Amino acid sequence: MYLVTGATGSVGKRIVRRLRDRDLPVRAFVRLSSSYAELEQRGAEIFIGDLAQERDIRKACRDVRYIISAHGSDGGQAQAIDYRANIDLMDFGQENRVEQFVYVSVLGTDRGYQDSPVFKAKREVENALQKSELTYTILRPSGFASNLLPLAERFRDTGLYFAIGDLKNRSSILSPDDLAEIAIQATQREAARNQIFAVGGPEILNRDDIPKIFGRVFQKDPFVVNLPLSVLDGVRSAVGFINPELQRSLGTLRILLANEFFCTSEEIHRLESVFDIQMESLESFLRRYLVNS
Ligand SMILES: NC(=O)c1ccc[n+]([C@@H]2O[C@H](COP(=O)([O-])OP(=O)(O)OC[C@H]3O[C@@H](n4cnc5c(N)ncnc54)[C@H](OP(=O)(O)O)[C@@H]3O)[C@@H](O)[C@H]2O)c1
């Protein structure tokens, strides 16, 4: 039995779908408020719980062979959900002698970003996992192509593309379908045991390549509106007076916008050979979801 947390999220739902496509048993950890009907229809066992509750995690881990931790937190929940829930999953996973723990982290956790509770939590979880007795695979993904779907749809309608920060910053935008496949494969491949992988798309893109790709996909000339990072800094300082929690969450966004998150060609080569996969480009992903669907 696979336990998948974040089973209704961008990558989690893709993991559950793929496991069910292969007829593998999967327990999908979902909140009562989540949209989980599709997972149920595909034959996943639905476990309704809250990752903030240790007793729910304890129950969910019973008779589980693999754990894939693919959840993320809503604003202000980094300590409880990104950190504590993963520590609980590890503890109960160990108690239940799970064969493998696959953890979806984030690219850049090793850079010591202090301004983001999410990056800090993920770094701590990675450390704890490496020190534990569990067999683990840590996946450090770059930004998901699915995040760009709403921007692409707006572009299709208006030709407009909004970007904050340096347009020359590089990223390796990743298909969450590929990440889902890798997360599953990690439980089945010897070479993935006790390993950390940077996971990204096959090409290193400057941010101003993105509107060009949109332009090609929709055959439209892009009109780019580029705002400086100082705009976000202004918003952050202003909200800090009334909502310090939101200010901290915006700290993560600032780190994502101000820094580069890309994988080297060696890292992609290692991924493709260990997992026997060809990583999908952003253009192919967009065509698959918005043109050929
Ligand atoms: N998105 C990216 O570009 C990106 C890039 C790098 C790394 N990552 C990491 O990849 C992981 C997955 O990201 P994602 O974008 O797929 O996540 P997502 O779409 O934001 O989904 C988050 C998932 O976590 C669940 N969740 C949140 N709080 C919960 C709670 N208290 N109890 C139970 N479930 C809870 C959500 O359930 P509901 O449906 O009920 O909200 C949802 O299924 C995260 O760890 C994220 O940090 C993401």
Image (cartoon, rainbow, N blue to C red):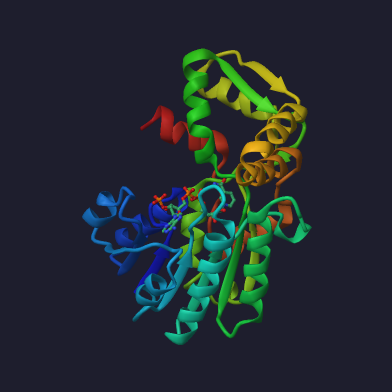
Q: Residue at horizontal 70%, vertical 21%? A: 226
Q: Quadrant of the C terminus?
A: top left
Total numbered circles = 0
111 lies above or below 237:
below
Q: Is residue 212 visible?
A: no
Q: Quadrant of the N terminus?
A: bottom left
Estimate the x, y position of residue 73 in percent, counting from the top left.
52, 53
Placement of 59 over or under 156, stated as above or below = below
Where does residue 219 sit, x and y in percent of width and height? 53, 16
User: Is 246 in front, or is 209?
Assistant: 246
Q: Is residue 29 visible?
A: yes
Identify the residue shown where x is 58% and y is 65%. Answer: 83
Query: What is the x, y in percent for residue 41?
Result: 21, 54
Residue at the limit of the structure toward the front, as seen here: 242
Of residues 281 and 1, the one nearer the viewer is 1
Residue 75, percent across and down? 54, 47
Residue 97: name its quadrant.
bottom left
